[in-house]
Amino acid sequence: MPAYLLLQQQEPPQTGNFPKTGELPPLTEGPHLSYAIQWFLFTLIGLAGYVGLVRKEAKERSAAGDSEAQAGP
């Protein structure tokens, strides 16, 4: 349901007809650089984990293949 509020009084009273906007916060880099570094590190950890899992799987398959080859027909 659409609605609006009407200000009856204000302490301290506003001078002039229009409300004044508050001061904007200073523009800084903030935590953006640390978040970017964090996500790049997550990417590196994920890639390293993937490579590690692929190598482990290849080693296990190689070991299984060697044991089958040694068993013979």
Image (spheres, rainbow, N blue to C red):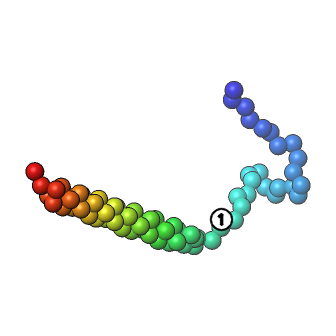
Describe residue 17's horizontal placement relative to residue 65 as left or right: right
| Front-lying residue, 31 or 2 | 31
Q: Position of residue 58 (x, y in %)?
A: 25, 61
Residue 54 is at least partly visible in this image: no
- Classify mark 1: residues with Cα within 10 Å, few (<14), some (14-19) or many (20+): few
Image quarter of residue 45:
bottom left
Is residue 45 something that shows in the picture? yes
In the rendered image of this protein, does residue 72 appear above or below residue 40? above
Q: Which residue is drawn at 63% across and 71% down?
A: 26
Q: Name the residue under label 1.
A: 24
User: For the view shown, which residue lies furthest in the top direction?
Assistant: 1
Taking depth in this image into account, of 30 and 63 the one nearest to the observer is 63
Could you say which quadrant of the image residue 30 lies in?
bottom right
Position of residue 44 measured from the top left corner of the image (x, y, whole percent): 39, 68
Nearer to the camera, 60 or 26 = 60
User: Residue sitting at 56 percent across and 69 percent down?
Assistant: 31
Q: In the picture shown, does residue 14 fall above or below 30?
A: above
45 left or right of 68 in image: right
Image quarter of residue 51:
bottom left
Residue at point 49%, 68% (across, down): 38
Q: In this view, does 6 lie to the left or right of 40?
A: right
Residue at the spot x=10%, y=51% of the render? 73
Three-letter residue code for mark 1: Leu
